[in-house]
Amino acid sequence: MLITHGLYEAFLAVARSGSFTSAARSLGYTQSAVSRQVRSLEEEWGAELFERLPRGVRLTEAGRVLLPHAEAVRDRLAAARAELTALRTLDGGTLRLGAFSSATAALVPRAQAAFRKRHPGVVVTRVEGPSAKHLGLVAAGEEDLAVVSPAADVSTPPGVTLHHLLDESVLVALERGHPYAARRDVRLAELSGEEWIVGHEGPADALFRLALDAGLRPRTGLLAYDWIAKLGAVAAGLGITLVPALAAAAVRPDVALVTLHPEDVPYRPICAAAPGSPTAAATAFLALLRETAEELRSAVA
């Protein structure tokens, strides 16, 4: 059974006013149009809804039974209209956001703070994890937007569009007393004899893979999955590690950061991954990510 909102609207107007003429005037319709809508509703339900009187109408028993249901339909449709409007105007709704680890140190939180200030009615949920995971979640419709650093040898899933935000340099974290701690930059060849602290062995460490691809064959003296553990080990002189530039501001003060020479390790691209038809909230957040990325680029220029 298909009953349109307009039929309910006409029924409620007549029930409220007790007159087809008055209902037509309040709705801005002709009296014959209101009569046709009520008749269509009566045909749908198979019952007379109004008793026609010499002057006006009144609800029949069937009409009285239908009345609260029609009011409920009106209220639910009004609520749905308000929620859909809120999604369009960014006065409500939810943004499901994903990001890889180092993007959550500066880029994402700055953009999120600006988004909250502009659109406080939108709830932002954020999940941290590897870029490949987030690309899959965006493709599956389980995330609305994600900040990723896509690997060059991994294809973008169908239905996902990458929006370039910035290119990120790679830094080496050294203990303050290290001979290279005061250098402006350092070559990979100069670090070949160092003990390296990594999150995973071999290519599984996405950041370290850049150095491996550049020809470094290091000694990995310590595996540490957490950034606090990695940098603590560096500060204690147990080895050195790679740090993405986006996370530089979060590095503890007793650790020195030196830029890897760009000829050794290329800048890695940082992108926003979005579906082909992003939500209004995702589109607005993407604009703020671009603004924040430009601010970060200017700060290190």
Image (cartoon, rainbow, N blue to C red):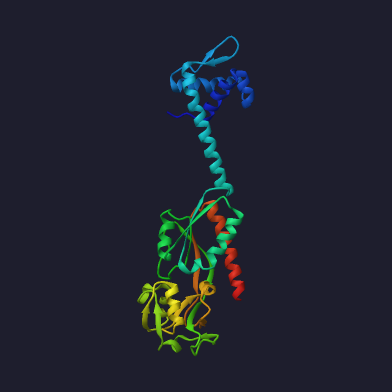
Residue 212 visible here: no
Q: Position of residue 222 (x, y in %)?
A: 37, 80
Q: Residue furthest left?
A: 201
Looking at the rendered image, the quarter that the C terminus falls into is bottom right
Viewer-nearest residue: 161 or 142: 142
**As drawn, 142 above or below 222:** above
Q: Residue furthest top?
A: 54
In the picture, residue 86 is in which quadrant?
Answer: top right
Viewer-nearest residue: 8 or 255: 255
Viewer-nearest residue: 45 or 95: 95
Residue drawn at x 53%, y 55% as measured from the top left: 282
Residue drawn at x 45%, y 81% as measured from the top left: 234
Q: Position of residue 264 (x, y in %)?
A: 47, 82
Q: Position of residue 164 (x, y in %)?
A: 53, 66
Residue drawn at x 50%, y 70% as measured from the top left: 269
**As drawn, 164 above or below 65:** below
